[in-house]
Image: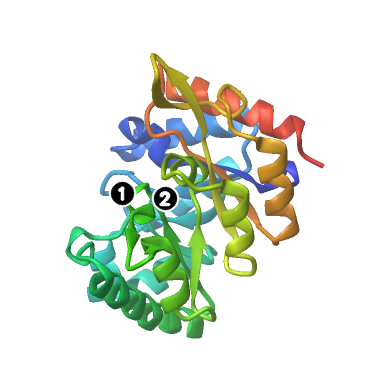
Amino acid sequence: MKKNQIAAQLYTVRSFTKTAEDLDAALQKIKAIGYDAVQVSGIGPIAPEAVLEMCQRRGLTICATHVPFEWLLQDLDNVIKVHKAWNCRYVGIGSMPPAYRTGLSGYQEMARTLSEIGAKLSEAGLGLIYHNHKFEFEKIAGKTGLEWLLEESDAAHVGFELDMYWVQAGGANPVNWVLKVDGRMKVVHLKDMAIVNDTQTFAEIGEGNMDWPAVLDACRATGVEWYVVEQDVCPGDPFESLALSYHTLSGWAE
């Protein structure tokens, strides 16, 4: 992991990206922290051209996105157009729509749908990545939902964007899962897990209990390209949380 591979997930600062003016100010702060890349997610209805102009002016690469699943189903050509304009290869799905969370048949249908979308994105030179939460670790017919997605989807066209916090929250081993998706994960989500009053809670990198040296070693070994910091809930100013995570991670960079 090099410093320029560490990115900030804009969802972390979603309350500060609802207008173009606010987004530009947020990007300025993120660049000042030291980040060279961002993942676009959770921003307001801002024209793609404006987003690109701001990121270029601030010297920030758009490394990945999260887009609404219905856009992939209904407006894929435009999704491709925007990502190509942004020079952004990785098209992310932030979560599985509830309609597919219906047992094994739902996971199999989701895998088929992802494979179809992923094939079209691959033809355009882009990559589809799926971001997990905790529910995918519920057992269905002897395997976790995420195992079914991994096995039933087309390895050539469906990638994963494992969220290390949610893997651990689901009772699984983050390192083992990084190794499971070897060759299929170019973007990883990093957030720490702390225990406060006997409850799991989000924390900045290095402020919780996760085994980051082992996780990062596995990511390096399996070819992860982007290490994206995301903190769903921050104890105070989310920019301060992004800064703390960046400075800890950058200290471990090569």
Say if residue 244 shows up in the picture. Answer: yes
Q: Is 78 placed above or below 88 here?
A: below
89 horizontally vs 77: left or right: right
Residues 241 and 207: in front is: 207
- Residue 183: percent from the left, percent from the top? 64, 69
Q: Is 6 placed above or below 144 here?
A: above
- Residue 2: percent from the left, percent from the top? 75, 45
- Residue 85: percent from the left, percent from the top? 48, 66
Question: CB under 8 Å between callouts 1 and 2?
Answer: yes
Q: Which mark is residue 46?
A: 1
- Label 2, secondary structure: give it: helix
Going by the numbered disc 2, the residue's amino acid type is Val
- Residue 86: percent from the left, percent from the top? 49, 61
Q: Point out the residue furthest to the front here.
A: 142
Q: Residue at x 37, y 28 (%)?
A: 233
Q: Is 121 placed above or below 26 here?
A: below
Q: Which mark is residue 178?
A: none
- Give the mark count: 2
250 horizontally vs 50: left or right: right
Going by the numbered disc 1, the residue's amino acid type is Ile
Q: Residue at x 33, y 44 (%)?
A: 43
| Quarter of the figure with residue 95 | bottom left
Distance between the alpha carbons at the discs numbered 1 and 2? 7 Å
Which quarter shows the C terminus?
top right
Q: Point out the residue furthest to the right here.
A: 254
Instruction: Identify the mark nearer the N-term, 1 or 2.
Output: 1
Say if residue 75 shows up in the picture. Answer: no
Q: Residue at x 58, y 68 (%)?
A: 184
- Label 1, secondary structure: give it: loop
Residue for badge 2: 51
Residues 123 and 147: in front is: 147
Q: Residues within 10 Å of mark 2 (few under 14, many from 20)?
A: some
